Amino acid sequence: MKNNKSLTTPYVHFNRQQWNTLHNPVRCTLTKEQITNLKIIKKDLALEEITKIYLPLCVLLHFYFKYYIQHQCKLQQFLGKQLIHIPYIIGISGSVAVGKSTMARVLKVLLSHCTEHLKVEVLTTDVFLYTNKVLQNLGLMKKKGFPQSYDIQNLIKFVSEIKSGAPQVIAPQYSHVIYDIIPNSYKVITQPDILILEGLNILQRNMDYSHSGLYPIFISDFVDFSIYIDASEELLMDWYIHRFLICRKEALYNPDAYFYYYAQLTELETMEIAIKIWEEINGLNLKQNILPTREQASLIMTKGKNHVIENLYLRR
């Protein structure tokens, strides 16, 4: 996203130096050693990225969350009724391989320790993909990740129950090892303070991605604060190929893994397949369904080489 001062924009632009100055004091019980250990989540995540980008983001999200709680309290006083606990939902969107899962896991740790020990849960919308068997029967395996490949009715039902304050909400579980929904395996979400929901589809509002009914309902209708992670397509493709090769390597001795087949090929053959998948599936999905949602986000974060966040655009 380019910042053009001659154009009226709903966003305030910050470069990484300006963003770092926003880091005002919020009590954080994480030690320097514990923050360093966050790199275990992503080995190539620099400590500087955590301190200069993620900690100020944590402060910002804490500010919005506190405002949300104050709003709930005032509403309770106005209505004269004790309101039920409603989780605050943070949505993280962006392309395949842009780093949504890494950001979600880091924010979970930081928000849990730096903001009054809040209860934070993370869920990916991948868990609401149709099973590979269903996708194959529908002829959609080459559209996996596109709007039509998701069980949108159950996804909307899930976020609706979260926002209704249900004591427990159950979601399926997805494995990136078998590249499929795990049979008879579920995750129980029990009234967190914050739910971080990450996926390709958080901000999508096309009719294929709405709950069926007289009035369309979208995931974004339930999201309180949304983040779009942006990067050039050239970088995204490089990161995807790199991740593809890592998955291939990890599957070398696991015949049950989806990537075991690719582990039997040469690295060059695997790269050629990864490029083809990007061009025919992930790159196409990015252009058609993901990138058009970027300007709907509360915060746009643009990455450069090595996943370094260079610019941030906060909605006014």
Image (cartoon, grey):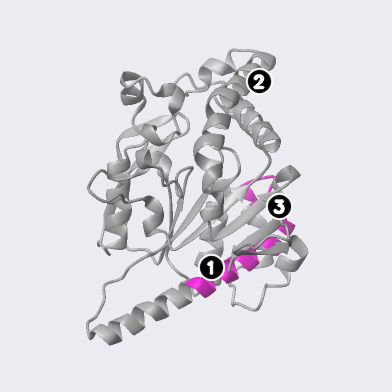
User: Residue 26: x and y, percent?
Assistant: 60, 77
Question: Number of callouts in the render?
Answer: 3
Direction from residue 6 to residue 204 in the image, left or right? left
Residue 121's x, y, as percent? 42, 57
According to the picture, the residue beneath numbered tag 3 turns out to be 2
Q: Is residue 132 visible?
A: yes
Q: Which residues are magenta?
A: 39-64
| Vertical relation: 280 (above or below) 228 | above
Q: Nearer the viewer, residue 75 or 127?
A: 75
Q: Amino acid at mark 1?
A: Leu
- Residue at (35%, 34%) from the top-left corner? 182
Specify few, some or many for label 3: CA neighbours under 10 Å numbering under 14, 14-19, or 20 or more: few
- Earlier sequence position, callout 3 versus callout 1: 3
Magenta stretch, main secondary structure, is helix
Quarter assignment of residue 48 = bottom right
Q: Are marks 3 and 2 in contact (CB under 8 Å)?
A: no
| Residue at 50% in and 72% down | 64
Q: Amino acid at mark 3?
A: Lys
Cα distance between the residues tagged 1 and 2: 39 Å
Question: CA–CA distance between discs 3 and 1?
Answer: 24 Å
**Measured from the top left, where is residue 284 in percent x and y?**
55, 30
Identify the residue position indicated by label 1 in the image.
61
Is 163 included in the stretch rendered in magenta? no
Separation (CA) of disc 3 from disc 2: 31 Å
Helix, strand or loop at label 3? It is loop
Q: Earlier in the sequence, mark 3 or mark 2?
A: 3
The residue identified by callout 2 is: 271
Q: In front: 23, or 313?
A: 313
